[in-house]
Image (cartoon, rainbow, N blue to C red):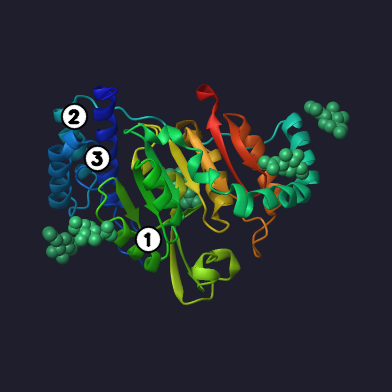
């Protein structure tokens, strides 16, 4: 155990979030989408604490006053001492003249970069998106995947590193499939939501080979609901800020832009050690993907640097203090 004190804080943070999540998470047309972190998700030693907390949550969460949260915080502080909270706040996304200039260059080269980089990536170097992340071997590593789909990447991540792993998948059909696939792995938690700017339910059509191109951007008059939740709120409820996320990886058919822009508009970005994303810039219905991509590059550059980059295809960035 690298740092037991830190683990307790992480544990406490996640417990807070489980509670806050169960307590506050409501969406249009969806009564509740729960995070059920498995009993021994943190470390083998934290099992009784977490089990007890889940009990506490389920017996207390039905009364709807803020008093519950206070009671929960009191409960936590009796166990762990004072619970610390960090301030998550908005930050400027206005580019400086220098950043603006670089983003103009980025835009000029965008289509060429995408063609050149795409032809190297697909079918040849694409496994880099899983093999690159060897730091996940640390048994305390926390990883979040936005857009689990059928779990092809997740299977590789689990095989390679078996991190503590939260998979978000908005399509119910795939959510069920993922849950079944990883039901024996207590380090994996699957949640039936996607992330975006705000809470919404988009009615979409299942598209693409094995539905891997289903997206709210390709039309919202379909029959299948996609559950999307406010990315900032979700990550805050999860307790991000009290602990760092080792890897946030995003492959969600165009939702990457919203997820990146949302996270980059607050200091939550400072708590993401590695941020990997696909781009899907040719998806129809997506507003100004190239311009947004180039702006995202500049915002991300303030805190992170790329560790590999196939521009407008797939890339991963690491926080400056870790380089
Ligand atoms: C929770 O509250 C609802 C209505 O507010 C009530 O119908 C239900 O019985 C309560 N459940 C428990 C377990 O107390
Ligand atoms: C940005 O580019 C313009 C013209 O291309 C140049 O005049 C200006 O000095 C540049 N600004 C910065 C901050 O690099
Ligand atoms: C991406 O394409 C550019 C040329 O447009 C090239 O300079 C760069 O090396 C490529 N990157 C990768 C990782 O292939
Ligand atoms: C889970 O474990 C059970 C019992 O060991 C086994 O029968 C089953 O095949 C496993 N399921 C998966 C999806 O690995
Ligand atoms: C998302 O959640 C954050 C934190 O609760 C809130 O400040 C923000 O206004 C929300 N965004 C939208 C678009 O609802």
The answer, for residue 88, to whether it is visible in the render is no
Q: Which mark is residue 265?
A: none
Q: Is residue 176 above or below residue 77?
A: below
Q: Which mark is residue 27?
A: 1
Quarter of the image holding residue 41?
top left
The kind of secondary structure element at disc 2 is helix
Q: Position of residue 108 (x, y in %)?
A: 81, 45
Q: What crowding class fits label 1: few (fewer than 14 Cα within 10 Å), some (14-19), or many (20 or more)? A: some
Q: Disc 2 vs disc 1: Cβ atoms closer than 8 Å?
A: no
Residue in view at x 68 percent, y 51 percent: 118
Residue in view at x 37 percent, y 60 percent: 27
Q: Disc 3 vs disc 2: Cβ atoms closer than 8 Å?
A: no
Q: Is residue 82 above or below residue 25?
A: above
Q: List the residue tagged with mark 2.
A: 77
Quarter of the image where ligand 3 sits:
top right
Q: Which mark is residue 15?
A: 3
Q: What crowding class fits label 2: few (fewer than 14 Cα within 10 Å), some (14-19), or many (20 or more)? A: some
Q: What crowding class fits label 3: few (fewer than 14 Cα within 10 Å), some (14-19), or many (20 or more)? A: many
Residue in view at x 79 percent, y 39 percent: 105
The answer, for residue 134, to whether it is visible in the render is yes
The answer to which of 318 and 85 lies nearer the viewer is 318
């Amino acid at each position: 155990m690298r740092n037991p004190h830190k683990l307790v804080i992480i544990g406490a943070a996640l417990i807070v979030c489980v509670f806050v999540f169960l307590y506050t998470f409501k969406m249009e047309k969806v009564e509740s989408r729960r995070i059920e972190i498995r009993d021994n998700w943190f470390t083998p030693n934290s099992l009784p604490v977490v089990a007890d907390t889940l009990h506490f949550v389920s017996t207390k969460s039905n009364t709807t006053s803020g008093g519950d949260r206070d009671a929960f915080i009191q409960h936590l502080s009796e166990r762990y001492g004072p619970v610390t909270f960090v301030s998550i706040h908005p930050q400027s996304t206005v580019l400086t003249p220098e950043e603006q200039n670089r983003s103009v260059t980025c835009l000029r080269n965008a289509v060429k970069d995408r063609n050149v980089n795409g032809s190297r990536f697909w079918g040849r170097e694409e496994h880099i998106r899983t093999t690159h992340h060897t730091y996940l071997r640390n048994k305390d590593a926390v990883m979040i995947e936005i857009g689990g789909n059928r779990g092809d990447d997740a299977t590789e991540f689990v095989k390679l590193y078996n991190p503590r792993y939260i998979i978000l998948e908005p399509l119910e059909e795939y959510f069920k499939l993922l849950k079944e696939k990883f039901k024996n792995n207590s380090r994996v938690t699957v949640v039936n939501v996607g992330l975006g700017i705000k809470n919404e339910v988009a009615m979409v059509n299942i598209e693409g080979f094995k539905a891997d191109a289903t997206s709210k951007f390709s039309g919202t008059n379909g029959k299948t609901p996609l559950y999307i939740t406010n990315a900032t709120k979700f990550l805050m409820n999860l307790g991000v800020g009290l602990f760092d996320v080792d890897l946030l990886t995003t492959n969600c058919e165009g939702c990457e832009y919203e997820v990146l822009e949302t996270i980059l508009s607050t200091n939550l970005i400072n708590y993401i050690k590695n941020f990997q994303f696909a781009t899907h810039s040719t998806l129809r219905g997506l507003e100004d993907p190239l311009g947004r991509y180039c702006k995202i590059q500049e915002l991300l550059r303030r805190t992170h640097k790329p560790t590999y980059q196939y521009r407008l295809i797939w890339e991963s960035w690491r926080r400056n203090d870790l380089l």
